[in-house]
Amino acid sequence: MLLAGDAAHQYVPTGGYGMNTGIGDACDLGWKLAAVLHGTGGARLLASYERERRPVGLRNCDAARRHSEKRAAIAAVYREAGDLTAPAADAARGAAGLRIGAIGNAENESFGIELGYAYAASEVICADPGADIANDPLHYIPTTAPGARMPSVLLSDGTPIFDRLGLWFTLVCFGAAPSEALVGAAARRGVPLDVLRIDDPATVLVYGLGLLLIRPDQHIAWRGPSCEHARAADAIVSRVAGFGDLA
């Protein structure tokens, strides 16, 4: 049984993470189900769903709890301050404002929670050993490390790079020639693969020279400066498409 959204997790409403997490579940599971049904994905795709999404669900649940506790702390400030509407309550209002400011506004500013989740430990990701992926709930730090969501930029013509990605896997080539080995490996496996070449210097500066293999959910499945050997390419495609590692 595969569960997503509120069927799999229910949170207190602070942060609005129930909807965020449910949409993330659907994005992760939807393309994997479609790939398996179309015969372009292996059994490990569905097995990877829980491993990818369960840590995100637990992290978001914990964050919602923290936000709820902060709301309770803010309510306590108001109770302790008494009547703040009186004209003579300027000093009390100022003191209460400082206390509330110190508590913070993480509920509305946790960009790391909303954008920074990654699947580096997934069995269908070609992870980079030792890659630094931030796990800060407040701050989102873009990265091209496999497992992370592809950072978003506007191309030189104003088009969001996500609008240039294919429906299935996309091999994005930043200032580098497309890998014929990867294209051939995808064809042998029957895995749909689009190739997107980006030579704009400003965009290449953001992503770095090299290749990124992007999944349908916009997460990075593999990265490298090149891939020239058929055996290596077959191993990459087999892993990210859920067919397992080659012996």
Image (spheres, rainbow, N blue to C red):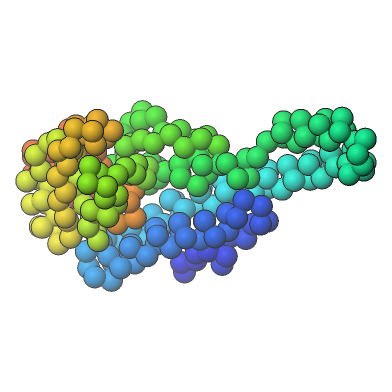
In the rendered image, residue 55, in percent from the top left (x then y), is placed at 51, 47
Q: Is residue 107 left or right of residue 70?
A: left
Q: Residue at x 62, y 40 (%)?
A: 106
Q: Residue at x 39, y 29 (%)?
A: 132
**Residue 236 visible in the displayed image:** no
In the rendered image, residue 241, in percent from the top left (x then y), is placed at 25, 55
**Residue 114 visible in the displayed image:** yes
Q: Quadrant of residue 173?
A: top left
The residue at the far bottom in this view is 37
In the rendered image, residue 203, in percent from the top left (x then y), is placed at 24, 36
Above or below for 46 versus 95: below
In the rendered image, residue 113, in percent from the top left (x then y), is placed at 52, 44
Q: Nearer the viewer, residue 12 or 84?
A: 84
Above or below for 35 versus 99: below
Q: Quadrant of residue 77?
A: top right
Q: Nearer the viewer, residue 161 or 64?
A: 161
Q: Residue at x 85, y 42 (%)?
A: 78
Q: Is residue 113 left or right of residue 187?
A: right
Q: Residue at x 52, y 56 (%)?
A: 20
Q: Nearer the viewer, residue 225 or 85?
A: 85
- Looking at the rendered structure, the number of numbered marks drawn on it comes to 0
The residue at the far front in this view is 87
Above or below for 2 versus 58: below
